[in-house]
Image (cartoon, rainbow, N blue to C red):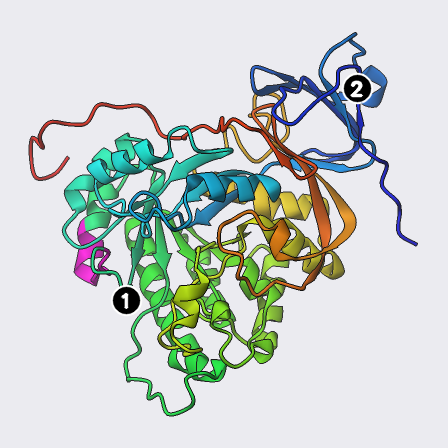
Amino acid sequence: MSRKSSAPQAGPAKLDVGSEVMYVRSNQVVLDNTIGPAEIVISDGKIVDVLPKRNWARPSGEKILDIGDLVVMPGIVDPHVHICEPGHPSCEGFASVTKAAAAGGITTIVDMPRHCCPPITSLSALDSQFQAAKGQCHIDVAFWGAIVPGNQTELLPMLKAGVPGFQCFLMATGAEDFSHVSLHDLHVAMNELQDTNCVLLFHAEQEPNQPVPVLEDTAEYSTFLDSRPDTMEVEATLTIAELCLQYQIPCHIINLSSAQALPIIKDAREQGAPITVETTHHYLSLTSECIPPGGTYYKCCPPIREKSNQEQLWAALQVGQIDMSVSAHVPCFRDSKEQNNGDFLKAQAGIASLQLGLPLFWTSAKCRGFSFHNLVQVLCKNPAILSKLEDRKGSLRPGMDADLVIWDPEKEFEVKKDIIHHKCKLTPYLGFQLCGKVFATLVRGRLVYMDGKFATKAQGELLVSERQMPTKNPSPYY
């Protein structure tokens, strides 16, 4: 019989969404080593103390949020989110993305550099992104830079401006202003970045040595799957592992879909390579066998693979061979998906899912024996470490930002369009019955989301350092 969660209760002062909170009380607070009753004490946006129940302060008239048996965890950090602003006003922007994130218990996202215009390949482009985001974000936002051919002199200035690292592609992206890198480009960039404490993010697919013929119906998902075989990920992972061992620069593989690449990563780690890897919620929740003909809203790169492959990904997560699961949210719109008449080879790639990450992951993970501590490691701590934010995000302890997700792990709900807050409502998860409903989200002690309502004022921080734009480059290399 399932336990019925206590209804959340406000303390002496009524708390509305948008309010600052000074105390959060719950019977299920997920700390680094324990789960149990605790009171989180907050001041100036930081956690200043965590008290056991017997020591709970009882101030009169203070802002207390008492939520009974609901679970309190560190806010989720999603280091892989694509935002189309600036440059694409009709597409997903900072306001809608960060609202959806807040509704999903996410308190920090890191924006990928590709989908904005211009992409973040230079210091000036980073500044454009920074200016576009100001005043729009409901949660905290950081930014990745990018490596493209010829931009090596921009890398150190972007690092000094606050990006934690850089993304690159090993094969054509389909975007004219975001070219993939050659092996020569990577040697130049990695030589430039040694001893900088940055991380390189790799989309791990390479063109196959032999062209893959497309002979079948392009409305069938199997045709698309056959066009991007596991060998593309395996070959790319071999390249990344060799570079990581040579330069000893932390390397992170994004979008891992093929379990066949996992032994390469394991071997590289054993040899001393500082290499990490993520998978995504869609690789853990969807399988190729269930994708309908013409269902191009399931398309992503690398592709969703077979059920047997998915089980290997879950097993790797359980033993720490995969470090985290992320949304890889790409805001694809119905028109761009449907104008190709269900052709998987022509349709835009990307799955919209940002808001649903916690319940998607928990619905499958709880059946596999994952604990709340496992969730925190995979969804909060490890992503914070990757994003160079572990000194303030990913854990509930004194000195950390008061970023919290409050949720009911037993509450079931159906995914319907009217509950989705990102602009793109077309997602493979429509109609799914999921378990684990977010009740409230706090960012630096402020209730940004609670029970279906959002704070009217966006008060998220941009996690880059303030700087003045350089007037000129004193030399070809910084």
Quadrant of image for the N terminus: bottom right
Mark 1: few/some/many CA within 10 Å (<14, 14-19, 20+): some
Span of residues in magenta: 178-188
Q: Is residue 292 visible?
A: yes
Residue at which label 1 appears = 171
Residue 74 position by quadrant: top right
Residue at the farthest bottom position: 215
Report the front residue among 382 and 4: 4
| Residue at figure coordinates x 49%, y 66% from the top left | 262
Position of residue 400 measured from the top left corner of the image (x, y, whole percent): 56, 25
Q: Which of marks 1 and 2 is in front?
A: 2
Name the N-terminal-most of marks 1 and 2: 2
The amino acid type of the residue labelled 1 equals Met
Residue at which label 2 appears = 11
Position of residue 354 measured from the top left corner of the image (x, y, whole percent): 53, 50
Residue at the farthest left position: 475
Using residue 293 as the reference point, say whether residue 158 is left or right of it.
left
Report the front residue among 242 and 240: 240
Report the front residue among 264 and 260: 260
* Labels in figure, total: 2
